[in-house]
Amino acid sequence: TLSRAFKSTSESIAIISHIYNSLKPTPNWNVSVDKSNANNGLNKKYNNIFYSISYPSDWQHYENPDAITDVMFSSKNGETGFTIISFDSDLNMNDLIQESHQNLSSIGLKIDSSHKETINGREFHKITINHGNYVKQIQYMVKNIDKFYIISFIYNENNNKSFNTTMGGIMNSFRIK
């Protein structure tokens, strides 16, 4: 299931031990869900004090599904979704990328691509990871001042075309406050 996949990837891939050990406690979230109309069928909006993001109206969100994940979003069938992790760190982006690559290799996952991508004028680093059995993970990493944000999507390659449209809309809606 998706929740099982996210727990292992968020703990084993997205946050490496160096970063995990430097996590600082986060304040209360002050979360609201806005069901107003948005573009591309993304008519739900998740807000907390650090960022906002839109997602499909038929998806569910789960706050703090594990010790390090802020929020997880899942399609009804549980085969598609994403997580957001945010944490304070003095690492720079290149150090995080290097440690992420080393961690992925150490657990036997294949990196299909790793490059910079600009979304709404903000530079993200995008890593595409192959889990096998048609399962792909795409991580978008960005740093704002001393806080990192990792948005991690997981999906079945067979649904690639429709999911790329949804993922693009979700990423275009992401705003750091």
Image: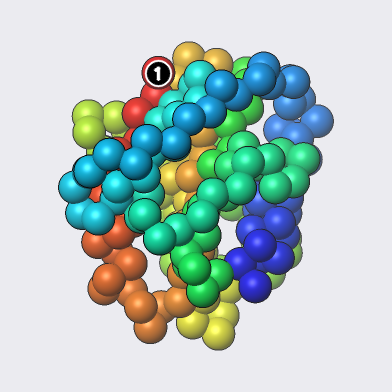
Above or below, comparing residue 148 to residue 158 in the picture: above
The answer to whether residue 55 is seen in the rendering is yes
Q: Whole-percent x and y of residue 165?
A: 25, 61
The C terminus lies in quadrant: top left
- SS type, badge 1: loop
Front position in the image: 69 or 102? 69
Above or below, comparing residue 51 to residue 126 in the picture: above
Which residue lies most toward the right here?
21
Residue labelled with disc 1: 177
Question: Which color scheme did the rendering employ for the protein?
Answer: rainbow
Front position in the image: 40 or 102? 40
* Relative horizontal placement of residue 87, taking residue 42 as reference (left or right): right
* Relative horizontal placement of residue 175, taking residue 132 as reference (left or right): left
The N terminus lies in quadrant: bottom right
| Residue 142 figure quarter | top left
Mark 1 nearby-residue class (10 Å; few <14, some 14–19, many ≥20): few
Above or below, comparing residue 5 to residue 99 in the picture: below
Q: Whole-percent x and y of residue 24?
A: 73, 20
Which kind of residue does numbered mark 1 sit on? Lys
Q: Residue at x 23, y 43 (%)?
A: 37
